[in-house]
Image: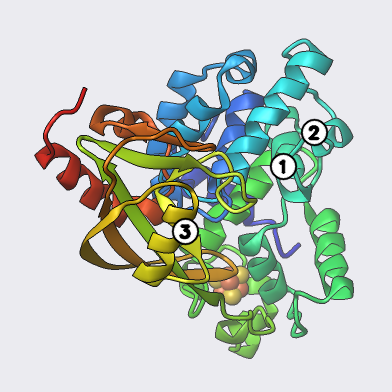
Amino acid sequence: MCYSGLLPWYDQHKRVLPFRGIRDPYGIWVSEIMLQQTRTETVAGYYTRFLSLFPTVSALAAAPEEAVLKAWEGLGYYSRARNLHRAAQVIAAQYGGIFPGDYEAIRALPGVGDYTAAAVSSIAFGLPYPAIDGNLTRVISRVHGIREDVGIPSVKRRIAELAMAHIDRERPGDWNQALMDLGATVCVPGTPDCARCPLAAGCDACAEEDADLLPVRAAAKPPVPVDVGVGLVTCGDRILMQRRDAALLRGLWVFFLMEGDASRESMQKKLRSLGLDAAYKTDLGEARHVFTHRVWNMRLYHFEAPEPIPLQDFSWVDAEQLRALPLPTAMRAAKKAAEAILNAAPCIK
Ligand code: SF4
């Protein structure tokens, strides 16, 4: 069998990670959600802190969303945190805080797709579901010599069928984790290290010497550039902040933003339309943040308002309150500039 060397290899070479070797479905679920689109080394620190803040499903369900977003700050893709929170509330309400133990119930939770449901089912409950992510797709396409675009539904189905046919029924969780580790350390994107691979003897791409060309993927569309004006609107030692309601970065706090127009004049006009006659102070330079489907090309300005008048959907916060708010990574440069301004500002009552 082409996968017979996999588990002995895993027993010897598995990566040491804080979420490895655990059977607690809650911890496995949190780690799998964090690992989506995020590097394993980054996740390790976040995972330990998140579990110490919210040690159980019930603790997570009972926490305010803002506390969950704050714990997620810097990890990106914040819909993962919002869904994690909502799913914990579903588990608390529908299952009395006990993590459901069957695939369909796990798959039905908010933010849980086929991959996460399979990972939790197999690792925590020993159910034979292959966790098909980028790593597993790469290894399977190479071992079985699949040379068609892996984004095509029929090719995806074929990969899923092959994984299902080969998953180890005794140790499905370890089989999935072994492929994750093999894909991360040996059968890496680009040129794999076939000389160290336990699957080399039965690997089609290794025999054909075209592993570096697999898997075949259609080129992704580049993210769309968007000009964004970022206004640091201060009044003494306070700064104007807004909690996002738009789908992108919902629930996180941002400075005064204008998407689609980054000119100082437009920003000042918009502030005036809100009733705030803020004076332009200085240009704070540029920043850039790449999301999955768009790029924010940001221009940062400092404006000074004569009075901290209350504005609907906005709050005036001081430096300490600013530190406590969950801000997206896209605001990192603006936050640094804001802290410098606030720390140098005179106190107002
Ligand atoms: S032999 Fe090479 S290409 Fe095949 S699975 Fe192993 S590392 Fe990947």
* Among the two numbered marks 3 and 1 on one chain, the one whose residue lies closer to the N terminus: 1
In the rendered view, tell whether residue 23 sits above or below residue 154.
above
Circle 1 packing at 10 Å, graded few (<14), some (14-19), many (20+), is some
Residue occupied by mark 2: 106
Q: How is the image coloured?
A: rainbow
Please state, as top left, top right, bottom left or bottom right, where the C terminus lies in the image.
top left
Residue occupied by mark 3: 270
Residue 238 x %, y %? 27, 35
User: The residue under label 3 is which amino acid type?
Assistant: Lys
* Among the two numbered marks 2 and 3 on one chain, the one whose residue lies closer to the N terminus: 2
Task: Give me the residue at 56% from left, 39% from top.
Answer: 251
How many labels, in total? 3
Mark nearest the camera among 2 and 1 is: 1
Q: CA distance from mark 2 to mark 1?
A: 10 Å
Relative side of 232 to 314, left or right? left
Kind of element beneath mark 2: helix
Residue occupied by mark 1: 111
Mark nearest the camera among 3 and 1 is: 3
Tell me, yes or no, whether the two marked residues, 2 and 3, touch with CB atoms within 8 Å.
Answer: no
Q: Determine which quarter of the picture holds residue 285.
A: bottom left
Kind of element beneath mark 3: helix
Kind of element beneath mark 1: loop
Task: Give me the residue at 19% from left, 28% from top.
Answer: 348
Task: Give me the residue at 54% from left, 44% from top.
Answer: 244
In the rendered view, tell whether residue 4 sits above or below residue 151.
above
Q: Determine whether the beta carbon of the residue marked 1 sits less than 8 angstroms from the nearest atom of ligand 1.
A: no
Q: Determine whether the beta carbon of the residue marked 2 sits less than 8 angstroms from the nearest atom of ligand 1.
A: no
**Looking at the image, in which quadrant does ligand 1 appear?**
bottom right
Circle 2 packing at 10 Å, graded few (<14), some (14-19), many (20+), is many
Residue 176 x %, y %? 67, 48
Circle 3 packing at 10 Å, graded few (<14), some (14-19), many (20+), is some
